[in-house]
Each structure stands twice: as C-alpha cells, then as structure tokens.
Amino acid sequence: MNTKYIDLVNQTFDFPQPEFKLENKTLEFHDVNLMQLVEQYGAPLKFTYLPQISNNINRAKQWFADAIEKNNYKGKYNYCYCTKSSHFKHVLDEALKNNIHIETSSAFDIDIVERLKAEGKITNDTFVISNGFKRAQYVTNIARLINNGHKNAIPIIDNYEEIELLSAEINGKFNVGIRIASEEEPKFEFYTSRLGIGYKNIVPFYKNQIQNNENVELKMLHFFINTGIRDNAYYWNELSKCLKVYTSLKKICPSLDSLNIGGGFPIKNSLAFDFDYAYMVDEIVNQIKLVCEEEGVDVPHIFTEFGSFTVGESGGAIYEILYQKQQNDREKWNMINSSFITTLPDTWAINKRFIMLPINRWHDSYERVLLGGLTCDSDDYYNSEQHMNAIYLPKYNKDKPLYIGFFNTGAYQETIGGFGGLQHCLIPSPKHILIDKDDEGNITTKLFNEQQKSEDLLKILGYENNMETSEPTSKILETSLNTQ
Ligand SMILES: Cc1ncc(COP(=O)(O)O)c(C=O)c1O
C-alpha cells in the first residue's frame, strides 16, 4: 500500500514541477536546497528568491510580444511594477533590471522613485504611473517629480479635485490618466468601486475639467478590477464596458493613446494551478483591437501594473513543526514555531491559499492535520489546501523534526504584516534571507534581516533599554500636558 507522503503527492498532482523537485529526499525550490537553508539559518525564516522576479517579468513581456505580433497590433506594451506589493530595495533593484516602468500608490513611493533615479535605475523615460487617492503630500511629491523634469510621470486622476490640486503645484503642462471606477462583481457588498470615476461620468469629467485646460493633457485610461484578470463573463463584460469608454473618449480627445489594464494576473497557489496566461493576453489584445476597429479609432498602447505576478512567486516562508496537540479523535494540531496571522496575514484576513509542502520526510507516512500558529488568537491557523480543506503532512514524530514551506508568498505579506513592527502576542518576525544566482549560475544566500529581538519590540512599546538614560516620567507628563 502507498502510504508515504511522496506517494500521496504523486497520486494527486503532476510532480516534480519546474520549480519543485526532490533531491536527496528533501525539497528543492528553483534548485535551492531548502533543508540546507534551514540548517544554515534556522527556522522560522522567510526568503526571497530574486531571479523569479525577472523570470516572471520576461514571461509576461513575451506573452504580450507574441499577442501583438499575432494580432498585428499597432500599439506597444509597457510592463509596470506595482510597488505596493513589495517596496523592498532588493525587489525594485531586481525588477528594474528588465527595462520596466513603475506604478505608485502613495506619497512615500515617490521618494523611492527619486532614490532609484539618483542611482540611475529609473530615468526620465521610465513611466511613473501614480494611482491612489491623492492627499497633500502625494500631490506635492508628484509635482516635485514632474517639475524636476520627469516627463513620463502620469498621475491617474482618482477624484474630481485632483486636477486642481496638481495644477496648483505643477509648473506648466502635464499628462494625466483617469481611472474608471469598475462595477464590482455581483456577489460583492458594493456596486461600484470607490476607486476612480464612474463609467458614465468619465466623458463629462473630461469635457468639464480637461478638454479646454491648456495645462493638462489626457494620455491614459486606467481600468483595474479587484478580482483580477480571469477568463470569466464578469471580466470580459467589464473590459468591454471599459473599451466603450476608451473609444468614446478617443473620438473627442486625440492625445489619449494608452490603456492601462491594471494588475491582477494570478499566481500559482497550488500544485494543481492551471491558468493559460498566453491565451488571456492574446484574447485581451484581440478584444482591444476589435473594438477599436469597430469604432474607427487607433488602438492604444497597453500598460499593465502587475504586483503579485511580479514578486509573489519569489517569496517563501519555512516553519518547524514544534509539537502536535491532539484535541479530539479527529483533530490533530501541528503547531508551527511562528504565527500565520503576522507572517502570512492574507491567510487569516482574506483566506488566501498558498502552496504548502513539507521540506523533509517525504518518504514517511502521512496524516491529516490542522496547522496552528503560536499566538493565543484562535484565528491563528491555516487549513485551506487543495481538496476538501484538508492538509496532509508526514506524521508528527518528536524525534524527527519536520519543516514545512509556504511558497509564492512574496507579495503584500510584509507590508500588511508590518515588517519590523509590533507583532501579535509579540511573536517576533522571522529572519529574512535573500537568495540569488551569481554570474556562473551558482546559488548565493545572504541574511537580509535578523529575527526580531525582545529589545526591538520593547523599544517600539516605549520600554527603554537603559533606565538611566530614559526620559523621566515627569518630563513626559509635562510635555504631554503642554501639547493638549
Ligand atoms: C491600481 C492597482 N494596480 C495594480 C495592482 C496590483 O494588483 P496585483 O497585485 O493583483 O497584480 C493593484 C492592487 O491592488 C491596484 O490597486
């Protein structure tokens, strides 16, 4: 009888897969020996496998290049990276090796753009697409970027006041885009997204605020659906509505020449993941061309702003199973030596599923378990796996440590979890390792950040390390009274 974990995987999925294989009975991810990583750095740990960022950017560029050629499409394609999915310098440095552009979402993002410009990684030719609701500091920073000569900056107008706010700070002419507020999926709580301007209001808005404004030129229509790019009726219907707006606007606005279809490319979240990217890209390009032909307008340049797709598949987390608690005859809780809520917050907040696999003991028999985190919050668990919500892992054995990995976790988890900040129940954030390949193709690893220490957390909480140097309570009280 086949009762080993490896048999279970072989019966359920195609295995090995391009990025996952077994070598000496332990798991490798893109040829990185994960057991060695654990032996060198200890678990829990998080890692970023940098080459996957460039791999994915180039895969997407190729799909668009193929679709443009096949459809004899006259516009260009521009790949932008949505920085909010991971702002880390190592991520931007890797992404920007591939001649791409940037999408920003808040004021401090522009400071990052300026830092990267100072290093020569971004130039005035790089498109900087600025989305988001623009408050004073964001407007000021965008204006500074444009006033300093960044001709390819395109703020995307999200509300009716932004043109006026930007005009007050930008010297001379500038380009803008307009974001369409998409209609949400029928099962969603709201009808229309709060982001952007409603379909019906876009042409009137253009006529009122842009058409006769000498300083503002409309270049781009922006369209992003929350649920992402999917081959379903909802997506195609929304795209078609967006294209109607594009062609109506184009007829009265000759400067409009770009369509931004946002982010939302899915990433692999299970070994059974199946998404035909090339077909989707081909169909999107084809649809845009058809509608433009029907309406007799030139096709737009196409922009995307992939966040998860750029960086998601570069990240992973490895935990050790510390202990097993059998709470009744059916429920066995494998306790990890960290927390899901803080290290993979999307598993808790939006029930997001990631690929989960053991790192070692694939040739041992398996059992059905639940995974629990270390915080004393009853929601700190993970149980969403492919098929029936069940998780199978090699049987717990206190004498044979078991390590498990979560893969493709590189987008959003650090910023939502508050990297380096306070953590629920003060369970420290794990160390973070950067993995790269050198010029000869050898794998290199580097510690990016140590596991948080007690001092780090206590300092944030206001407990000084050295009582003698800390400010006397009376002084603090005095200052707080004076500011009231
Ligand atoms: C305007 C905009 N563009 C791009 C993205 C990136 O989406 P994803 O990470 O799904 O590619 C987002 C995500 O929320 C967004 O709001």
Image (spheres, grey):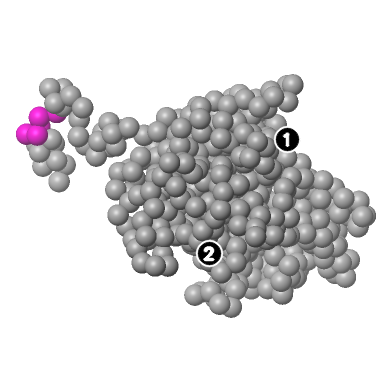
For the question of whether residue 356 can be seen, the reply is no
Task: Name the amino acid, label 1.
Answer: Asn
Counting the numbered discs, the total is: 2
How packed is label 2: few (under 14 Cα within 10 Å), some, or many (20 or more)?
Answer: some
Residue range highlighted in magenta: 471-475
Q: Is residue 186 highlighted in magenta?
A: no
Left or right placement of residue 20 versus residue 462 in this view: right
Kindly identify which numbered label has been placed on residue 98.
Answer: 1
Kindly identify which numbered label has been placed on residue 295.
Answer: none
For the question of whether residue 483 can be seen, the reply is yes
Left or right placement of residue 81 versus residue 319 in this view: right
Nearest the viewer among 75 and 432 is 432
Looking at the image, is mark 2 or mark 1 nearer the viewer? 2
Residue 103 lies, in percent from the top left, at: 61, 45
Q: Residue at x 74, y 45 (%)?
A: 18
Question: Which image quarter is the N terminus in?
Answer: bottom right
Outermost left residue = 474
Task: Name the amino acid, label 2.
Answer: Ala
How packed is label 1: few (under 14 Cα within 10 Å), some, or many (20 or more)?
Answer: some
Residue 178 lies, in percent from the top left, at: 63, 58
Nearest the viewer among 480 and 262 is 262
Q: Residue at x 41, y 60 (%)?
A: 332
Residue 469 lies, in percent from the top left, at: 16, 22
Vertical placement of residue 322 versus 274, above or below: above
Residue 296 lies, in percent from the top left, at: 88, 66
Vertical placement of residue 362 versus 238, above or below: above
**Which residue carries the number 2 mark?**
390
Looking at the magenta stretch, what is its main secondary structure? helix
| Local SS, label 2 | loop
